[in-house]
Amino acid sequence: MLRYFDIAAPLHHQDEELHLFPPLLAQADAATVALVRQLQAEHLRMAAHWQTARQPLAALAAGQLQQLSLADEAALDAFVAGQAEHIAHENQHIYPQAQALLPAPAQAAIGQEMAARRRS
């Protein structure tokens, strides 16, 4: 789990920031633009919450901590709280909007660039 949120999640957010959000901000309706702005802010909050939540999880994984404190649990709760709603907004609104907006060749090029970035 640490690896996913250390590596894959930031790359996922970077993909959205580089490839999905710009065309939506430029061409989508006002409600979608507002949602994109909300998701951008959430990306920053999620990264900050992860940095706080990561510490006790890493200590647990390393055997340096046997039990989470109330503060650790609160940090994890703060991190988890925004995840479900964020993912729902992406899946229900942002991805369908981007798919409708971007032609198939552009989508293929985005996919290739994302795969290449993960290989390097």
Image (spheres, rainbow, N blue to C red):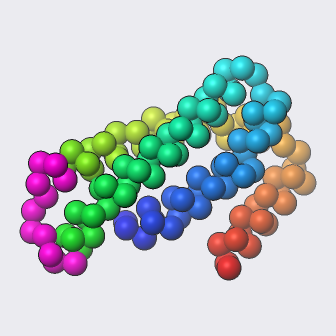
| Quarter of the figure that contains the N terminus | bottom left
| Image spot of residue 39 (x, y percent) | 56, 37
Judge whether residue 100 can be spotted in this image: no
Q: Depth check: 67 or 51 in front?
A: 51
Is residue 69 on the magenta stretch? yes
Identity of the residue drawn at 53% across and 64% down: 8
Q: Is 57 drawn above or below residue 52 in the view shown?
A: below
Up/down of 118 relative to 79, above or below:
below
Q: Is residue 47 above or below residue 21?
A: below
For image coordinates 42% across by 70% down, the residue present is 3
Left or right, 120 with respect to 38, comes to: right
The stretch in magenta equals 62-72
Residue 84: percent from the left, percent from the top? 42, 40
Quarter the C terminus occupies: bottom right
Q: How many marks?
A: 0
Where does the image place residue 81, in percent across and percent down from the top left?
34, 39
Q: What predominant SS class does the magenta segment belong to?
A: loop
Up-down relation of residue 113 to residue 29 (above or below)? below
Relative placement, left or right, of 77 versus 24 is left
Is residue 58 a member of the stretch shown in magenta? no
Q: What residue do we see at 67% from left, 41% from top?
A: 95
67 vs 22, left or right, is: left
Question: Which one is nearer the viewer's eye here, 109 or 70?
Answer: 70
Residue 31 visible here: yes
Q: Residue at x 70, y 71 (%)?
A: 117
| 5 sits left or right of 114 in the view | left
